[in-house]
Image: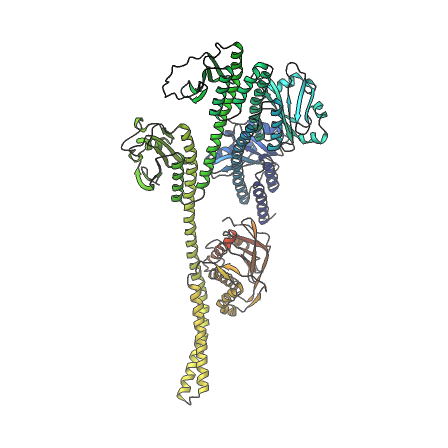
């Protein structure tokens, strides 16, 4: 296979891989497909992918492999990455993507390969995004191999693309985590009012089948002490009962109870007796694998089993979501079990049921407190009571709700009681999963002393209230987290709407100002090379201000954060030892609560954000965490804006440089035309001189008017001819305007042919014009295109010193040009000569600057031509065979380059006229 065909294969492979990334497939499937593609492209014998853990303590995983025994993969997971030569190279050289070695040189691999797999050569490709090394792609051959530069370029590009894919998978999984939280929150809302086991089972199975997408879902409820049948429910079959141990033995149920993460069950392992109750079509929905999850009570006793299966592979995300739901199902089943147990006590049932409903009818903490305490006091006919909750910060029970004389009011610890403090008669702890989360205190009963039954009621209802309070707390935390994520999402979207640094800073500070109800918000941006001087931005009620400030590391609050790069929240600035009246005077005289967070990107300190409130103890650690998240997003946005600004500057410099080189190339071409132009001007000058001599003779003689008129006509015609030559040269010499406009290509080619007409005549070169009748107009810079075709025509003329044929062919291009992921209609211009051709060894370097095959040539003509075609979004191809002439093909898009997001063309070099044997240099 030739190098150009090999390159085409690489391009095709990369295109397939990048196309496969778009749908973000499962890593195991996608990485396996990548291995198949790479092994085929490199004719390799084996390959495997290693993904590193989040820390050195976490072992790597091997999600995909080809051509290797399972025992090798098993050992590869256990070997330390620090012993790998490739990993060591990639970890220390961040721009290194490919590392190769012989197997006997790698201390990690050679000992674990059996003799039946005699590999000799091994190459690793770094899978990284930025400086983060995510894993390696490893390829092995049974023979020695020398990878070409093209192979290295392909593997490097592959490593970059796979690194991007793995990063996208990480981000996608984070989004999935938020989706799981939302599913759980909705699931909690579905079950929150369910107090019957059957209702919970039915709602659970229907919700999982409908919302999570498992084709087959069922739940089995284990019998109580007096029952022997297993009650099973599936949305497809309804309820049915089967003997308990006919499905599984006691040891299997015990194994399931001791496996809270669940047991994976294949289609073949499905319990045979249970399969009898399901028709074949329904059972086929189970697929290759499903999961059985245990549901236990407070005593860790198995009470139910949730079964979920389907055609699609069972993912880790599915398992995590189901386990979280099982935890909540267990809580709800315990509620239902308690509710059912209370039904057995007729006299107590209405009281406990009311308390249960009061506790579980809402997920709002204050509502749960009010309803629970009212139900207890009403049921026990108590004078009043309180509910206190444990405060982790203070380590004490803090009263949260109180009833007195039938009225429930929030308990305000700061207010003094006007009536004597009641002494509790009954006190019951609120215990949730072994942890005391609160206390219920009930005051004197209106009927006298509390009976044992009433004490039992309070003890029975306390766990329900404890669970409801805990659920309310969890729901409140979850809702706060969702709201926080929603705010961060809105902030993130606002930060991505602009790449202008000043607008970005204004947006970020205004968002922070309103989000944290601040009095002042500062952004201190460190200048490049300026250790202490910062550009400061202030947002307050008056708007935004900009000024300069000196920050000395270690001095004052700002200097403390700069030195340690550690976020900081201060409850009262005036009481904090880090506060410096001199260094922190920019915070304001009234500043009391302060949050300060450094802006760090890739271990570089960009500056810091300070949020100020003129009220002490206003901000909490939770506010600081939210500000840290905001700061991380803001730091990345600021860095992106800076990089975009730098990119725009580089683009402008590149455009100026290209214009300068283009003008220089025009001067070179002008010099090459000078001799021909001198000859071309000399001919009409001689005619003018002869006409003037005859005119003088005629005037001295008979003065015949018809001859005078003829001599004057000749002189005027030849003078006009000279003026036209000079005009064309001046038009070509002057700097070209930069705008694109509608251009008719045939007229442009005719104008360029006029410039080289004398060259063609002197060399006795025949011009053949094969114009297309339906060639469309294009959007182009005509002066720039004239430069391109003038260079091509002169090169062709100079390649035919003994004469020949110059063929210029135009046509619609059937292939089109691929740009921005779509095929763009195009036209093509072929410039063919019958000259000496181009040496084979020069073909790869034709479009590099200062490379020429002609003595005295500048080497800029084709380099500038390539740049002009690239700016037009087109391509240029060269096919040549030494001694048999050369054909240069220029393809240009019909519409404007901006319409398709063009810019960045490509160049193809072909030896021997094979247009499909090119090397794509479009990446630079």
Residue 391, visible in the rendered structure? no
Q: Nearer the viewer, residue 761 or 169?
A: 169
Q: Is residue 249 above or below residue 479?
A: above
Q: Is residue 719 above or below residue 38?
A: below
Give the residue displayed 44% in from the left and 37% down from the top.
633
Task: Let me know if residue 337 appears in the view.
Answer: yes
Give coordinates of residue 844: x percent, y percent.
Answer: 52, 52
Q: How is the image coloured?
A: rainbow
Location of residue 255 in the rendering, given as x and y in whole percent from the top left corner = 62, 19
Which residue appears farthest toward the bottom when viewing the image?
Answer: 702
Query: For this view, does 811 lie left or right of residue 476?
Result: right
Q: Nearer the viewer, residue 857 or 786?
A: 786
Give the image quarter of residue 549: top left
Coordinates of residue 48 in the picture (x, y in percent): 58, 34
Q: Residue at x 41, y 63 (%)?
A: 734
Vertical relation: 260 (above or below) 855: above
- Residue 697: x and y in percent read 41, 86
Picture residue at 45% right of the left edge, 71% below the top: 724
Horizontal relation, residue 696 to residue 116: left or right:
left
In the image: residue 60, left or right of residue 654: right
Q: Residue furthest left?
A: 582
Tag count in the figure? 0
The front one of 240 and 675 is: 240
- For the residue pair 705 and 544, the one nearer the viewer reads as 544
């Amino acid at each position: 296979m030739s190098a150009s065909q090999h390159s085409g294969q690489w391009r095709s492979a990369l295109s397939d891989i990048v196309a496969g990334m778009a749908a973000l497939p499962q890593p195991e499937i996608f990485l396996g497909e990548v291995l198949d593609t790479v092994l085929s492209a490199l004719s390799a014998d084996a390959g495997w992918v290693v993904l590193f853990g989040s820390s050195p303590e976490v072992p790597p995983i091997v999600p995909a492999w080809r051509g290797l025994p399972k025992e090798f993969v098993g050992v590869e997971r256990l070997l330390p990455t620090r012993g790998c030569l490739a990993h060591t190279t990639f970890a220390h050289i961040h721009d290194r993507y490919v590392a190769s070695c012989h197997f006997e040189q790698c201390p990690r691999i050679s000992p674990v390969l059996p003799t039946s797999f005699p590999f000799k050569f091994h190459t690793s490709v770094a899978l990284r995004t930025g400086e983060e090394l995510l894993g390696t792609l490893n390829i092995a051959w049974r023979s020695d191999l020398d990878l070409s530069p093209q192979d290295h370029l392909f593997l490097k590009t592959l490593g970059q693309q796979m690194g991007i894919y793995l990063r996208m998978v990480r981000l996608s999984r984070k989004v999935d985590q938020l989706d799981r939280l939302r599913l759980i929150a909705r699931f909690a809302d579905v079950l929150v009012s369910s107090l019957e086991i059957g209702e919970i089972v039915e709602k659970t199975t229907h919700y999982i089948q409908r919302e999570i997408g498992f084709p087959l879902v069922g739940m089995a409820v284990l019998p109580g002490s007096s029952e022997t049948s297993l009650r099973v429910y599936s949305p497809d079959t309804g309820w049915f009962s089967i003997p308990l141990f006919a499905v599984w033995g006691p040891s299997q149920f015990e194994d399931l109870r001791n496996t809270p993460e669940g047991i994976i069950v294949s289609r073949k392992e499905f319990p045979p007796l249970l399969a009898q109750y399901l028709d074949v079509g329904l059972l086929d929905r189970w697929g290759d694998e499903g999961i059985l999850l245990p549901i236990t009570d407070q005593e860790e006793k198995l009470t139910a089993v949730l079964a979920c299966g389907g055609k699609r592979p069972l993912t880790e995300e599915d398992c995590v979501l189901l386990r979280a739901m099982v935890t909540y199902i267990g809580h709800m089943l315990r509620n239902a079990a308690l509710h059912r147990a209370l039904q057995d006590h007729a006299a107590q049932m209405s009281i406990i049921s009311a308390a249960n409903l009061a506790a579980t009818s809402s997920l709002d903490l204050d509502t749960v407190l009010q309803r629970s305490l009212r139900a207890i006091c009403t049921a026990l006919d108590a004078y009043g009571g309180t509910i206190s909750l444990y405060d982790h910060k203070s380590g004490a029970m803090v009263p949260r709700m109180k009833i007195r004389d039938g009225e429930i009011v929030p308990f305000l610890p700061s207010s003094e009681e006007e009536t004597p403090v009641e002494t509790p008669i009954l006190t019951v702890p609120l215990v949730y999963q072994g942890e005391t989360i609160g206390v219920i205190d009930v005051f004197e009963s209106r009927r006298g002393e509390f009976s044992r039954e009433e004490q039992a009621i309070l003890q029975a209802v306390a766990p329900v209230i404890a669970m409801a309070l805990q659920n309310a707390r969890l729901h409140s935390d979850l809702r706060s987290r969702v709201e926080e994520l929603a705010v961060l999402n809105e902030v993130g979207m606002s930060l991505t709407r602009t790449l202008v640094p000043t607008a970005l800073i204004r947006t970020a500070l205004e968002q922070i100002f309103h989000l944290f109800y601040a009095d002042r918000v500062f952004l201190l941006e460190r200048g490049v090379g300026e250790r202490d001087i910062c550009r400061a931005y202030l947002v307050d009620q008056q708007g935004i201000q900009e000024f300069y400030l000196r920050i000395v590391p270690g001095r004052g609050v700002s200097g403390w954060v700069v030195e340690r790069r550690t976020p900081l929240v201060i409850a009262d600035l005036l009481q904090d030892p880090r506060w410096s009246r001199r260094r922190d005077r920019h915070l304001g005289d009234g500043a009391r609560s302060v949050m300060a967070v450094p802006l760090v990107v890739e271990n570089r300190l960009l500056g810091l954000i300070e949020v100020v409130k003129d009220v002490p103890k206003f901000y909490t650690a939770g506010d600081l965490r939210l500000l840290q998240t905001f700061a991380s997003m803001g730091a990345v946005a600021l860095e992106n804006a800076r990089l975009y600004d730098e990119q725009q500057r580089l683009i402008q410099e590149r455009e100026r440089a290209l214009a300068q080189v283009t003008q220089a190339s025009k001067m070179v071409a002008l010099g090459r035309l000078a001799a021909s132009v001198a000859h071309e001007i000399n001919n009409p000058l001689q005619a003018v001189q002869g006409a003037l001599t005859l005119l003088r003779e005629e005037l001295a003689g008979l003065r015949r008017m018809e001859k005078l008129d003829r001599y004057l006509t000749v002189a005027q015609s030849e003078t006009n001819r000279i003026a036209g030559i000079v005009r064309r040269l001046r038009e070509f010499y002057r700097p070209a305007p930069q705008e694109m406009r509608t251009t008719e290509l045939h007229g442009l080619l005719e104008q360029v042919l006029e410039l080289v007409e004398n060259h063609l005549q002197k060399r006795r070169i025949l011009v053949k014009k094969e114009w297309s009748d339906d060639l469309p107009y294009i959007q182009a810079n005509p002066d720039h295109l004239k430069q391109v075709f003038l260079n091509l025509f002169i090169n062709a003329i100079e390649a035919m010193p003994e004469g020949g044929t110059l063929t210029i062919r135009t046509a619609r291009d059937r292939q089109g040009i691929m740009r921005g992921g779509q095929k763009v209609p195009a036209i093509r211009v072929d410039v063919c000569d019958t000259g000496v051709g181009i040496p084979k060894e020069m073909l790869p370097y034709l479009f590099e600057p200062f490379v020429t095959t002609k003595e005295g040539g500048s080497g800029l003509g084709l380099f500038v031509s390539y740049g002009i075609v690239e700016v037009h979004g087109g391509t240029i191809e060269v096919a040549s065979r030494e001694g048999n002439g050369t054909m240069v093909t220029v393809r240009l898009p019909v519409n404007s380059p901006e319409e398709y997001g063009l810019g960045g063309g490509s160049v193809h070099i072909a030896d021997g006229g094979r247009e499909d044997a090119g090397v794509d240099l479009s990446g630079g």
